[in-house]
Amino acid sequence: MTGKFNPEYHEFTARDGVKIGLAVYKMAGLKSLPVLFAASPYRFDNNSLPASPQFLWRETGPIDFYVEQGYAYVHMDLRGSGRSGGEFGFLDAKDQADLYDAIEWISQQDWSNGKVGSIGQSYYCMVQWFLAIMKPPALKCVGAHDGLADPYRAACYHGGIPCDFFPGYWWYQNRFINRFPAEGPSRDQDTDLTRMIADHPLRDDFWLERSAIDRLDQIEVPLFSSGVWSKMQLHTRGNINAFEKAKGPKKLRMSGAPNAWGAAAEFASVDFHRNVLLPFYDHYLKGLETSWTERPVVEYQVRGSARSRTASQWPPENVAYKYFYLTGQKSGSVHSLNDGTLLTSGAEVDGFTSYTYPNPGWVAGVVGFGPKGPAGGFDPARRVLTFTTPTLEADMEIAGPLKLTLYASSSATDTDFFVKVCDQFPAAEDLLAQGLNPGFEVVTRGWLRASHRTIDEAKSSSEVPVYAHTKEVPLEPGEVTKFEISIEPQAYLFKAGHRIRLEIVNGDSPVTEALWPHFYRPDRMGTDTIYHGPEYPSALMLPVLSS
């Protein structure tokens, strides 16, 4: 073991008779301790590995640190993983019942004082929503860090488009680390999660059972919802949705960690827990007066800067929604399929922009090489549609949800829209003349399969369209259709001298998406047309922070 405290292994019997395994970390001989509870399918036998970005699933936080602060730390193997019996069900009702039963079991142990708080990142956070919803009496607070609440919309079917993360990368690595743990017996997992997800392309009862999103308003226990801006392809919206919907005492914190690896390093650090989460737990589980009471209701870091902001609500009170209209005018700032422009007033003349796919220059998904070919490396902007603002004359800070209103047609009965909002950096004229593209950073993303465009009006607002995903509605080839495309919320500073770039295409790439690619479908062949101008005011909506 690499930790200071060796775990005690226990098990309890779930309500259906299945044995569920737990590891208990605590100082020897102590009784009546406040308890932190974590649960995942990653098995506690792997806790002897360092919680480093190399092991992204080691998301417990620093166990030793909390034990030294006078807590018992309980790590449960979810049903069908590690030392727990049963079959893995991916957030199903049996998983949820086990969580409740675990809290009841903990509250009855002599080393517990009957007060339990939940802890953990990513999957550990995803299960916390259900725990809070079910309200076991001993649960006194929920420290939910970086976790989705709607697996269909947030991860498995972005905008109705299948994502490879959970059925591919994630399920492979989860089975692998269960079969070859750092310590303990090997465990095979026979669940065919890939097939389970593929069998449910619409948001049916399978997904409703596994989605906390529609029940977040049942959360009454004190909640610290702590999210990460850069996890937009997975978790970001979950933490914001939980903060918005929960009914009990609640606060929101959004981290500016640059990516999944940076987010893992942040949550593994003792400083993060000492300064951010420990005061929360000490307040609700030990009854101490801590800095928690003085924390603002909302605090967030602004990506693209060193700024941190506070607010009394989300989005912040001083946000005004500003529209940037797509036009056919050339920006002259980037080499792409069209090099269109974003303007704050619509073009006077109606126009359109078309592209045919698959593009012969695509190499890895929709990404092609630069002007020097393979020797020049990949160029993500070159073979997609772009619409770019003029150079910004002053800083522009955004904070809140984004949306793209798009008027489009297709030669096919269905198509996909992959949308990115990017910060395009200044580029020297001579580099552009050589055919080279400027540097950039992806700020946020949005997705929509055209046949999934039906909006759930009861759950949507003018700024945030929510798709129902209960049926497919084919397109009429050649017919102009209005699409409202939700783009993941974000806080970002676009600096003076930079440009805002919108990218649109019908696929993505492992070059740009890391762990979250969407495989290009071989039957996606055709021509899509984007319409813009007074008759068809396609526009990007940004939540601009006023000074």
Image (cartoon, helix red, strand yellow):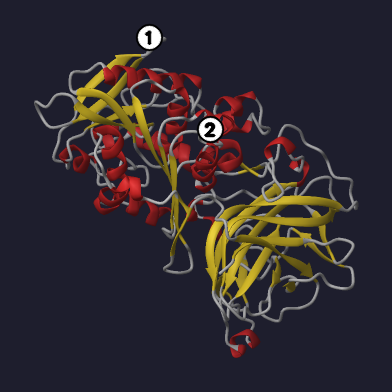
The correct choice, above or below, for 286 with respect to 421 in the image is above
At 48% from the left and 24% from the top, the residue drawn is 89
At 43% from the left and 37% from the top, the residue drawn is 249
Q: Quadrant of residue 457?
A: top right
Indicate which disc residue 409 carries.
none
Nearer mark to the viewer, of 2 and 1: 2
Tell me which label, 2 or 1, sits earlier in the chain: 1
Q: Is residue 186 visible?
A: no
User: Residues under labels 2 and 1: Cα distance?
Assistant: 29 Å
Residue 38, position in %: x, y? 33, 33
At 67% from the left and 44% from the top, the residue drawn is 159
Number of dots carrying numbers = 2
For the N terminus, give its image quadrant.
top left
Residue 492, position in %: x, y? 53, 64
- Left or right of 124? Residue 518 is right
- Residue holding disc 1: 17
The residue type indicated by label 2 comes to Leu
The correct choice, above or below, for 43 with respect to 500 in the image is above
- Dot 1: what SS? loop
For the C terminus, give its image quadrant.
bottom right
- Left or right of 446? Residue 360 is right
At 52% from the left and 28% from the top, the residue drawn is 218
